[in-house]
Image (cartoon, rainbow, N blue to C red):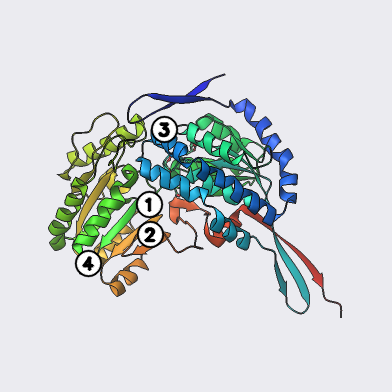
Amino acid sequence: MKALQSVNPATGERVGEVTITEANEVPAVVSRARAAQPAWAALGLEERGRLLVRACQKLLDKADSLAELLTREMGKPLANALGEVKTCGDAHSDVAEMIEALQDQVFDDGRIRTTQYRDPYGVCAAITPWNFPISMPHWMCLPALIAGNTVVLKPSEETPLIAQAYVDALNEVLPSDVLLIIHGADETGKALVASDVDMIAFTGSREVGKKILAASAGSLKRVVLELGGKDPMIVLHGADLKQTGRFAARNSFSNSGQVCVSTERIYIAKDSADAFVENLCQAAAEVKVGDGMDAGITMGPMVSERQRDHVLAQIDSALQQGAKLAFGGRDHHGNFVMPTVLRGVTHQMAIATEETFGPVACVIEVESDDAAIALANDTRFGLGATVFGPEAAALAAGRKLTAGMIGINKSCGGAKGTPWVGAQESGYGFHSGLEGHRQFAQVRLVSMQHNK
Ligand code: NAD
């Protein structure tokens, strides 16, 4: 039996270990989930919802210890970890929305009466990343389960312990084998994709998403992919430069930049750039970097050496190609990368086109608002985007952007009931909101003719 070690990225200390599920062991786990599925589906939507709310309550009961484990394993500040646990634990309104989304619907045209059902697919594989190591599994598992599927979760190899703790907490309430977990890296993930599952719900990088889509084509498995981004922020003429500078810092450095909708590219007119960068750097200077377990820390380490090296390599390469350091960029130590502001970034640099997933704000100076829109759309990604400026102009610019979620003078997230959706190569299918919940169910129609 091989073990997967979990290491604290702030201190290098070992947090614990789990047993790796070898590829040849995966089919037996999937068989257990399949055997449990009919009874789970037979409970009905309302009863599954009731059980899931109770199961999630277990996360609230253990919120402090779960948050501590999350921080020790992944690095984010304890207060943020606690927020993540509590948001998942309080599932009442999310479950109510899912129940609403999955109701049977009757259509009657006077000639034919059709009932549209939303049935479970069967067994759903959930494959998830490490950056929100409770929420990401949660947003794949919860809608799959409520729709009547059973789930086999393969969490990131960077955060196995907190994912195991999440599953253990829910399983205090859920029937046996309804939610199973397997551990390992890509070999375990590939075996799960190749196994007898009916659906794959994946959150992670664009590269792995493409591999999963290709690998599941042979059996036409249903696939939902929530992938990476390279989110632009456009600062239009007339924007409040203080507000936008602070927003840019928050949205570039939050979770050490390890957020799929982090602000990674900022487009601003040349004549506003100095004032904007000054405000951005002031906000960057307020970030307190350190071990997320320590009081007052607002930014933890990168999750791993690999992620740190990736971010530092992009910064170094941009500097070599002529970008200028406006803040940070030095004094990195261990897995800690300091908040960094770069100016003079161009689309010839990898840092402007490839996902960074680190605490770096890249400022790109443009001649006009139209040029900003054109450059913002010069990407194969398309997750989130933000536009700041006078409302009518910002709305008009927002409608020209190719992202899936566009925030006007705010971050990109939508109102309750709307999905989390990536366009272009940032997504294939989507989750959350009424439309997102429905992607975990097979539409099935039963029609009858009206008697003449
Ligand atoms: P990753 O793609 O490297 O890994 C994600 C998961 O896939 C892990 O569990 C990994 O073990 C597994 N995996 C790797 N290769 C596999 C394969 N061939 N077959 C099956 N599974 C495989 O991503 P990561 O580094 O864990 O997370 C960061 C990425 O996730 C970023 O690109 C980020 O933007 C993205 N992300 C997207 C969203 C969103 O909602 N769109 C949210 C969070 C993170």
Q: Which amino acid type is marked by label 3?
A: Glu
Which residue is labeled 1 in the image? Answer: 261
Q: For disc 4, does the CB lie below 8 Å from ligand 1?
A: no
SS for dot 4 = loop
Mark 3 neighbour density, 10 Å: few (under 14) some (14–19) many (20 or more): many
Q: Kindly report the distance in space between the C-alpha atoms of the residues bearing marks 2 and 4.
A: 17 Å
Q: Indicate the position of residue 268 as horizontal and vertical percent values.
A: 21, 60
Q: Indicate the position of residue 97 as horizontal and vertical percent values.
A: 57, 60
- Residue 139's disc is none
Tell me if 243 is positioned left or right of 271 in this view.
right
Q: Kindly report the distance in space between the C-alpha atoms of the residues bearing marks 2 and 3.
A: 28 Å
SS for dot 2 = loop
Asked if the residues shown at circle 2 and circle 3 are in contact, with their CB atoms under 8 angstroms apart, the answer is no
Q: Kindly report the distance in space between the C-alpha atoms of the residues bearing marks 2 and 1.
A: 8 Å
| Residue 14 appears in the picture as rendered | yes
Which residue ends up furthest to the right in the rendered image?
A: 452
Which residue is labeled 4 in the image? Answer: 239
Q: Indicate the position of residue 168 as horizontal and vertical percent values.
A: 58, 36
